Image (tube, rainbow, N blue to C red):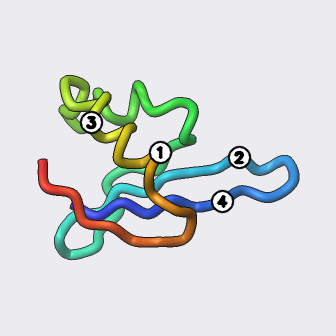
C-alpha cells in the first residue's frame, strides 16, 4: 500500500491518501480524523502504526508501507 500526505492550504485541512499496488485510491481522509476510514478498510487494529508512519512522512511524498 502507498501513502501520500497532502498539505492543505488556507481553510483546506491536511489530507492523506491510501492507495493499493495499482495506485487505486482506497481511502482519503483528514490527518486529524483517520478513525472511520481505517476501520472501514479493516486497519483499525493497525491505526497507531499507520498514524505514526503518516506523522513522520513529509508532505508531498509517496511512501510504501507493508501491512
Identify the secondary structure beneath mark 4.
loop
**Rendered location of residue 19, percent (x, y):** 30, 62
The outermost residue toward the front is 56
Quadrant position of residue 51: top left
Quadrant position of residue 9: bottom right
> Residue 55 shows which numbered tag?
1
The outermost residue toward the right is 10
Give whichever of discs 4 and 2 has the lower sequence position.
4
- 3D distance between C-alphas at marks 4 and 1: 12 Å
Local packing at callout 2 (Cα closer than 10 Å; few below 14, some 14-19, many 20+) is few
Residue at the spot x=55%, y=70% of the render? 60
* 2 relative position to 16: left or right: left
**Closest to the observer, 62 or 38:** 62
Residue at the spot x=53%, y=30% of the render? 33
Give whichever of discs 2 and 1 has the lower sequence position.
2
Identify the secondary structure beneath mark 2.
loop
Amino acid at each position: 500500500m502507498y501513502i501520500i500526505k497532502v498539505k492543505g492550504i488556507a481553510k483546506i485541512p491536511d489530507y492523506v491518501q491510501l492507495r493499493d499496488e495499482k495506485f487505486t485510491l482506497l481511502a482519503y481522509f483528514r490527518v486529524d480524523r483517520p478513525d472511520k476510514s481505517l476501520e472501514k478498510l479493516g486497519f483499525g487494529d493497525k491505526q497507531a502504526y499507520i498514524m505514526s508512519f503518516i506523522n513522520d512522512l513529509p508532505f508531498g511524498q509517496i511512501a510504501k508501507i507493508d501491512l
